[in-house]
Image (tube, helix red, strand yellow):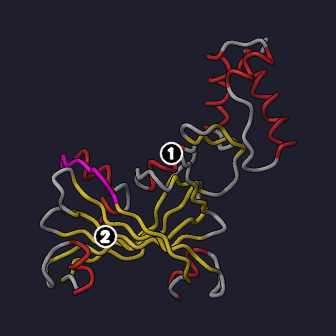
Amino acid sequence: MKPKYLVLVDIIENLIETMGKNQMIPSERDLANQYNMSRMTVRKAIDYLVSQNKLYRINKVGTFTADERHYKKADAFDGFSNEVRKTGGTPSSKLIEYSLQGANKEIAAKLGIKEGDPIYKVIRLRRKNGVPIMVDEAYFPQAIITLNEDVVKDSIYEHINHTLGLKIMTAEQSYKATFAKKEYLKHLRIDANTPVIRVELQVYLEDGRIFEYNKGYVNTNRYEIFSKSYR
């Protein structure tokens, strides 16, 4: 006999086909009541479908039918890899550029360092389930963060937290509609007339030091920002 959670998996898969993409499915409680199953069984079925990239969760909002987009809460910051994992996806990166250079006037001001101080420049294509989502240009002061090519091909934030033992605390984020740089078009699989979102970040450690300045160019067909307001 098929386990109960797999019976529910079949039911939800049929529901997904009728609902379309990015639609909220019934809550765990509603599904449990409707199909006379325990909340644990319902959660196991949903966990399975999330692992198969057929559903994704948004914390404190609900569970949705999946597509190839990436969803970001405007009032939250967790790093790209963790954001993707939390929505049931698999993150990956392609390294476009990695170099150690002197900070120019603009980057030095953003990082709170002196012009000419050594910084790492890291440009990566960020993907969810193999689909290109964004190209980000990241700058890290060498005096605070030590990197190498193996690290930048993986998760820099995990390296900062676990290897360097530093705690990432806050980020200031801004968003602007613009167009991607010419050299990024092929990576994002868009043309020059496709608008993108430029996400600009300054990220702080627990002690208040800025350890990253980042400019991300986001494919608007694959990325959506949302916020929830309270009165």
| Quadrant of the image containing the C terminus | top right
| Quadrant of the image containing the N terminus | top right
Identified at 72% across, 49% down, the residue is 22
Amino acid type, label 1: Arg
Q: Is residue 14 above or below residue 144?
A: above
Identified at 23% across, 47% down, the residue is 167
Give the magenta range.
Answer: 163-171
Q: Residues within 10 Å of mark 1 (few under 14, many from 20)?
A: some
Q: Is residue 147 above or below residue 21?
A: below
Alpha-carbon span between mark 1 and mark 2? 23 Å
- Residue 30: x and y in percent read 74, 22
Q: Is 93 positioned to the left or the right of 98 in the image?
A: right
- Nearest the eye: 88 or 193: 193
| First in residue order: circle 1 vs circle 2 | 1
Identified at 66% across, 56% down, the residue is 68
Q: Is residue 10 above or below residue 168?
A: above
Mark 1 highlights which residue? 85
- The answer to which quarter of the image holds residue 26 is top right
Mark 2 highlights which residue? 213
- Nearest the eye: 76 or 181: 76
Q: Is 160 positioned to the left or the right of 113 in the image?
A: right
* Magenta-drawn stretch contains 168: yes
Amino acid type, label 2: Tyr
Q: Are marks 1 and 2 in contact (CB under 8 Å)?
A: no
Q: Residue furthest right?
A: 18
Q: Is 167 positioned to the left or the right of 222 in the image?
A: left
